[in-house]
Amino acid sequence: MSAGSDGGGHASSARASRRKACDLCFKKKIKCDMVQPVCSNCILYKTDCRTSIIRRKGPGLGPKANNKAPHQPLAAHQPDKAPPSETRSSAPADSSTEDRLSRIEKQLQQIIEITKLSRTDTRLTPLNPDDDVSGSASNTSPEDVDSSTIDRTNGAETTSSVQCYSCPSDEFPLPPLEEAIPLVNHYFSIFNLVVPLFEQRAFMQLLSDFYQGGQSRTKAAWAAIQVVLSLGLRTATPEALQDGGGPDRFHRANLYLKNAQSVVSDLVTRDEDLLGIQVLLGIVILFQNSSDPKPASVVIGTAMRLAHRLQLHSEVATKHFTAEENLQRSRIFWIAYTFDKDISLRIKAPSIQSDADIDVSLPSLTVSDGIGLIWSQDGTSHFNYHRLRVDLAHIEGQIYDLLCSNRASRAPAEERKRRICRLQIQLNRWYERVPPAFQIDHAATKLAPTELTIVTKMHHAYLLATVMTHGLYSHNAEWLKMINSRNQGAIEDLAQAMDSCATKAQTPPFPGGWSRCVELSRGCMELFEKSTPTECLVWQCCCPHFSGLIVLLANMLIKPAHEYISLDQHLTTKAIQLFDRLLEFNPSESIQKIRAIVGGLYDRAFEEVGRVSAEKAEADAKAGFPSPGIGMFYDAASEEFFVEQLKSTQPDFAPGGFDPYAWERQGAASMDWGWGLDAVDETPP
């Protein structure tokens, strides 16, 4: 085979590679991932995915090639047209191999130069009302998107619109403005009202400038829009669940998330404004509400480091900003703080932000713009969700530091008992500050579906904090001792899988603490069942929800004839069914192992209940399911128990001079957390 023949093969391959796209992507000049049976762009644009077979003419045989001299150079602005290649039939008979190789190399160099020119083409494209799409939201960075708008036929230029706004067509793909606006408005009217990540007026100005091709067309602005669009799609209302496009809605949300991820490397050091950290926190929220929350723990660490670069945690930095800017900076910092502490407790890893290194004020309990507030359905009651969530995050951080950290694992039993009492009192007082309409036993009847979903997530975080405080998976726990020896090893494996802090030295739940975990688990699982089962609710609550499942099953083994046994059987059955559905989406080996162990515990508990029920006929059928009630969450008797335990145990563990209580009091005094830790040693009124 001659060199000229080889060169012709390379040129033919180059021509074929530019046609490796479906009909839609080829027509719109956008990058096609060729996923079978339907590519990502065809799913996004809701069209059939077809790839036509196009017969190409051989090199040098077309009419244009016949009208040109063999060595005629290509036009500098014809990216869609391959240069005519020399064939043996058209080459002079006396051409040497070296001449042919030289011509081929020259033509290939021209192809490279044309490709570079096509990527830097800055032609503006007019709006085409016939197009229902505006670009690709595929998993690519802006630089990788090839969406040239120039199509030449017989040397004539024809324009085809692939953008809904006037801007360079090969930079930042976004949906049409008329499609983006409803999603943005939905996000700001639902989610951002409670978690104020963006300031609406500033974001809408950024959005307008971006679509108009203004100076704000940066990677950070593009990523911020992608994050808001994804959050808008993932923040579903019951109406949106019915006619929101089903799987297509999830697919588009994931595409927008991947687009935002593609420019994360440019955001991690962006300290000239807040867009970088806002995008990172948006990505954290999206990952936390997904089937794989592990990336959230990595991104939140990056976000907290960027918060430190921005001095969001420092009071000194507030002097350089206006009151409005400081308000937004404060909100962003406390959102980051909340996720940092919450994720830390969930994955049993240290948080990034130290409480001792914060000197900015806590979020105000009263706000003039209504941001961060959740209202009851009748409009008669409200509470500051943003502030209470920060307070709960503070307790979550203490739970890790005082009970789950490496240093805490070496604490003597009496010291751990004192810490548990101290933390439970804080949890009690936190729950007492939640207005009655938003507490577990009233929320389902007092709140609209969207607000109920948000409050349900908060109560599940409270459940997780309580279960982690009381050492549910301690090897000395009563429910573990009741498991027969055949299942003991499997249950210990479950304890280690569910809580890596479970050790033989861990303090088992106090009698009052166990009752508290049972009642809270029952209430949260019932509240979960009454909430709209959005994918965000399911994935974010699954960890505490399944901890509650184990609590109820264990309690059925301990007390198989208690008064709420029918309700507990119903709730645990529903939870097992949910577990099975989640396994279909995430069939990992570790989760399957946990499911098998929990299934065995489920069968054992129901067998015990059946045995006792057969012996005690009076405990059989009840007419209805009584309300579980959460009245014991804060009562004088249980509070006295914990306070007496706290007084009877003196702290005697301070390795290396570390005094957690001195640190705690100093931090609390400077922070003014609102429920003074110094009062813990006193009996509440």
Image (cartoon, helix red, strand yellow):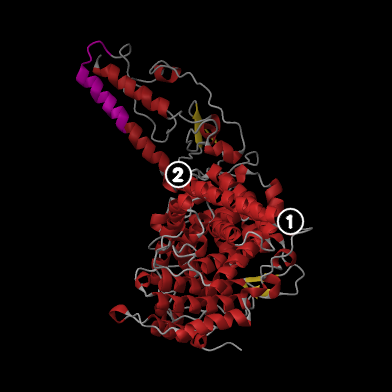
Image marks 2 and 1: residues in contact by CB distance under 8 Å: no
Crowdedness near tag 2: few (<14), some (14–19) or many (≥20) residues, C-alpha within 10 Å: few
Tell me where residue 120 sits by quadrant: top left
Left or right of residue 515: residue 472: left
Which quadrant of the rendered structure holds the N terminus? Answer: top left
Which quadrant of the rendered structure holds the C terminus? Answer: bottom right
- Which range of residues does the magenta coloring cover? 92-109
Q: Position of residue 517 (x, y in %)?
A: 57, 67
Left or right of residue 123: residue 526: right
Q: Secondary structure at mark 2?
A: helix
Q: CA distance from mark 2 to mark 1?
A: 42 Å
Q: Which mark is residue 533?
A: none
Q: Which mark is residue 617?
A: 1
Q: Amino acid at mark 1?
A: Ala
Q: Position of residue 650 (x, y in %)?
A: 41, 85
Q: Nearer the viewer, residue 240 or 45?
A: 240
Q: Amino acid at mark 2?
A: Glu
Asked if residue 187 shows in the view, the reply is yes
* Residue furthest front in the image: 615
Q: Position of residue 558 (x, y in %)?
A: 58, 61
Tell me where residue 367 sits by quadrant: bottom right
Magenta span dominant secondary structure = helix
Q: Nearer the viewer, residue 659 or 294?
A: 659
* Residue furthest right in the image: 623
- Residue 392, magenta (yes or no): no
Q: Earlier in the sequence, mark 2 or mark 1?
A: 2
Q: Position of residue 399 (x, y in %)?
A: 46, 71
Quickly name the residue at label 2: 589
